């Protein structure tokens, strides 16, 4: 077995990686849109915030059998390594997934990572694979999708103490520290039993995030809530529109700082983003979002806005110590 690192400049390797990924998606999560080569290249070059995962094409005797990702962060949680393994359905139940996992675990241990994680769709096969390798379920994430049909018709009274601001992208340098402080509010979201530390958001990480999505060809729409009396940033909601497939969009962060909760700012922010998209991107028809299943507040907001459950993913973890 070979694990071949995929260089985003290698068009053939990217094409083959995409083919394996889409073959797996067609069976495991057919509601997901196919990965495109353009999207794959953007992920491998830029990642979420300039800290991309490493991708591998897995071959056996010249046949592509699986795709794998190895994820770590240079900002925080340096004890963690996350793995993603997608085996071509035609090549399953031959031990390929286990062999790939062994290789990734070996690397993580060599790097001094102490906690290992992988995720899988809520299915018996994924749960069995995780259990066989000593991984335990720690968090359930739910994928939801909103089907957009013009401007929202939901009316929610706005509290007079706050104003909603359509934020420029990229963020002016002088505003990055305040936005970085606000972004840290996402650490209040439930993590259930995961061994995970708070994420760290220096201003340069916010700038890298905005730059990465622009380089990937996405258009970012960020609305912030600002407290009128103090000027403090109280909350934000961010949606990115896919430049390659502009009818598709992805909901990123929606969060409200602790001191400003209880005013329905979360739903107000998301509604204002929808109004902005109706004006600037009227072709958008789908918005995907992810939340912890235990995040009752945000789940309630999304259900109020008409999001539909598409699938559930289980996050598993184990110690890097030998089982």
Image (cartoon, rainbow, N blue to C red):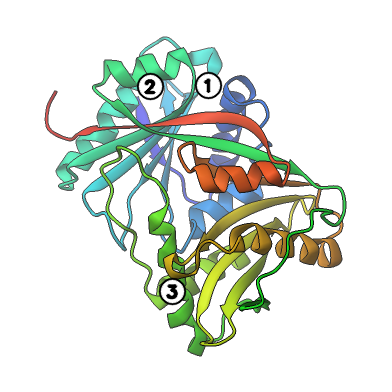
* Residue at x 80%, y 50% (from the top left corner): 247
Query: Which comes sooner in the sequence, label 3 or label 2?
Result: 2
Residue 258 is labelled as none
Residue, disc 1: 88
Tell me the element at label 3. Answer: helix
Within 10 angstroms of label 3, few (less than 14), some, or many (20 or more) residues? Answer: some
> For the view shown, which residue lies furthest in the left direction?
322
Q: Nearer the viewer, mark 1 or mark 3?
A: 3
Tell me the element at label 2. Answer: helix
> For the view shown, which residue lies furthest in the bottom direction?
174
Q: In which quarter of the image is the C terminus?
A: top left
Q: Which of marks 3 and 2 is in front?
A: 3
Q: Let me know if residue 23 appears in the view.
A: yes
Distance from Cα at disc 1 to Cα at disc 3: 40 Å
Residue, disc 2: 97
Within 10 angstroms of label 1, few (less than 14), some, or many (20 or more) residues? Answer: many
Please tell me in which quadrant of the rendered image residue 267 appears. Answer: bottom right
- Looking at the picture, how far across and down is residue 150, in whole percent? 87, 53
Residue, disc 3: 180
Tell me the element at label 1. Answer: loop
Please tell me in which quadrant of the rendered image residue 273 appears. Answer: bottom right
Q: Which of 246 and 270 is in front in this view?
A: 270
Circle 1/circle 3 CB separation < 8 Å: no
Query: Which comes sooner in the sequence, label 1 or label 3?
Result: 1
Query: Which comes sooner in the sequence, label 2 or label 1?
Result: 1
* Residue at x 62%, y 53% (from the top left corner): 251
Please tell me in which quadrant of the rendered image residue 138 appears. Answer: top left
């Amino acid at each position: 077995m070979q694990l071949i690192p995929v260089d985003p400049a290698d068009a053939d390797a990217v094409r083959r990686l995409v083919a394996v990924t889409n073959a797996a998606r067609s069976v495991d999560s057919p509601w997901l849109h196919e990965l495109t080569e353009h999207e794959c290249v953007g992920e491998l070059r830029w990642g979420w915030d300039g800290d991309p995962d490493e991708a591998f094409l897995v071959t056996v005797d010249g046949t592509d059998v699986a795709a794998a990702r190895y994820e770590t962060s240079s900002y925080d949680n340096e004890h963690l390594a996350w793995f993603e393994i997608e085996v071509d359905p035609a090549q399953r139940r031959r031990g390929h997934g286990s062999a790939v996992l062994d290789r990734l675990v070996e690397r993580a241990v060599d790097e001094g990572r102490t906690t290992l994680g992988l995720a899988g769709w809520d299915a018996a096969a994924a749960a069995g694979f995780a259990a066989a390798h000593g991984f335990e379920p720690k968090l359930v994430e739910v994928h939801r999708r909103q089907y957009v049909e013009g401007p929202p018709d939901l009316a929610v009274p706005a509290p007079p103490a706050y104003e909603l601001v359509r934020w420029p992208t990229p963020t002016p340098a002088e505003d990055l520290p305040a936005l970085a402080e606000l972004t840290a509010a996402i650490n209040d979201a439930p993590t259930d039993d995961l061994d995970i530390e708070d994420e760290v958001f220096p201003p340069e990480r916010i700038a890298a995030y905005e730059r990465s999505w622009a380089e990937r060809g996405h258009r970012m729409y960020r609305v912030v809530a600002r407290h009128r009396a103090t000027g403090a940033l109280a909350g934000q909601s961010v949606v990115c529109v896919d430049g390659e497939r502009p009818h598709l969009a992805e909901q990123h962060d929606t969060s409200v700082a602790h001191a400003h909760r209880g005013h329905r700012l979360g739903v107000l922010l998301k509604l204002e983003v929808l109004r902005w998209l109706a004006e600037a991107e009227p072709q958008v028809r789908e918005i995907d979002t992810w939340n912890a299943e235990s995040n009752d507040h945000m789940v309630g907001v999304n259900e109020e806005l008409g999001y539909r459950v598409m699938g559930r993913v289980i996050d598993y973890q184990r110690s890097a110590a030998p089982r």
